[in-house]
Amino acid sequence: MLADDLKTLLATEYAFVIKAQFFHWNVEGPDFSQYHKFFGKLYEEVYGAIDPTAEYIRILDEYTPGSFERFSELSQIAGQTKVPRARLMFTELLADNQTMIDLLNRCF
Ligand SMILES: [Fe+2]
């Protein structure tokens, strides 16, 4: 059902934003400045997709999820509790980005 796929997408977008923001705050290394800016831009862009996704759900006359608990049940990407090395941060977000693209394709 489209509304269910959109709820999964919403939760996954939120999880992605949290992770990208987490990396933005904690990335280290000689290229800190570029990495910090890149992760910042990334979470801002994906954050911009959250509200339209929620409004599509409402257009379908369903209520949106809206708690950490529900988002963590629905999200298709795993949260990160450790601070990985910068290179691993990129690898992880690249894979998570593909998960979001797959979800978007399913919704479209
Ligand atoms: Fe910041």
Image (cartoon, rainbow, N blue to C red):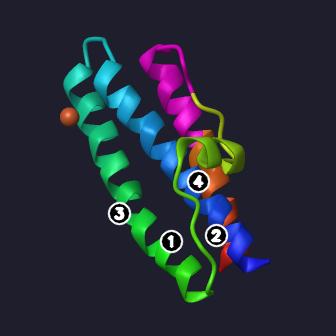
In the rendered image of this protein, does residue 37 appear above or below residue 98? above
- Side of 12 where 39 appears, left or right: left
Quadrant of the drawing holding the N terminus:
bottom right
- Side of 105 where 66 appears, left or right: left
Q: Secondary structure at mark 4?
A: helix
Residue 94 in the image, given as x and y percentages of width and height: 56, 41
Of the numbered discs in the image, which one, if any, rests on residue 6?
2
* Residue occupying the far right of the picture: 1
- Ligand 1 is found in which quarter of the picture? top left
Q: CA distance from mark 1 to mark 4?
A: 10 Å
Residue closest to the eye, 58 or 44: 58
In the rendered image of this protein, does residue 20 appear above or below residue 49? above
Q: CA distance from mark 4 to mark 3?
A: 14 Å
| Residue on which the image places disc 4 | 11
| Residue on which the image places disc 3 | 48
Give the residue type at disc 1.
Answer: Thr
Residue closest to the eye, 64 or 29: 64
Q: Are marks 2 and 1 in contact (CB under 8 Å)?
A: yes
| Residue on which the image places disc 1 | 53
Give the residue type at disc 4.
Answer: Ala
Magenta residues span 80-94
Q: Secondary structure at mark 1?
A: helix
Q: Residue at x 53, y 38 (%)?
A: 93
